[in-house]
Image (cartoon, rainbow, N blue to C red):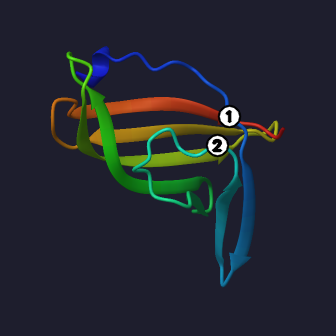
Amino acid sequence: MAAGDPEGQYTDTYGFRSSCTSGKCTATIIGGPAPRNPTVPQPVQFTWDGSSWTQVSDFQWDCMMPDTTIEWDPARADVRYTPQPDGSLSGTMHTDILSGACQGTLEINMTAERA
């Protein structure tokens, strides 16, 4: 069912704070709009794995049913942003909707640029 739900393109602006201690680097969103889905864990924090900024979260997918009611299905998102030569970050969000009417997988391509 999720495959039939169109996902429009949008742009948001976020502020990040990064720090590196004991060989571990993290970047935390400290400003910008709240997630469109209220079940996404906060704060959103990315970890540097040596080549990309990564983040994994468990949340509930808001699956719109044919009667327009919402069914909340368990999901897991794996986000990866990789630095590009022009200074931008190229990313993907791989989401597995684990069960329910919207069970399945989707991939969303993303780009992050300095404002």
Label for residue 1?
A: none
- First in sequence: mark 2 vs mark 1: 1
Q: Residue drawn at (82%, 36%), measured in percent from left and top?
A: 86
- Under circle 1, the secondary element is loop
- For this view, does 16 lie left or right of residue 44? right
Alpha carbon separation for disc pair 2 and 1: 7 Å
On the image, the x and y values in percent for residue 37 come to 44, 41
Report which residue position mark 1 lands on: 12
Circles 2, 1 touching at the beta carbon (< 8 Å): yes
Who is closer to the viewer here, 75 or 69? 69
- Residue extending furthest left? 100
Label for residue 33?
A: 2
Locate the C terminus and report the quarter of the image it occupies: top right
Question: In the image, is residue 104 above or below residue 34?
Answer: above
Classed neighbour count for the residue bearing mark 2: other residues with Cα under 10 Å, few (<14), some (14–19), many (≥20): few
Q: Residue drawn at (48%, 30%), measured in percent from left and top?
A: 108
- Quarter of image, res 67: top left
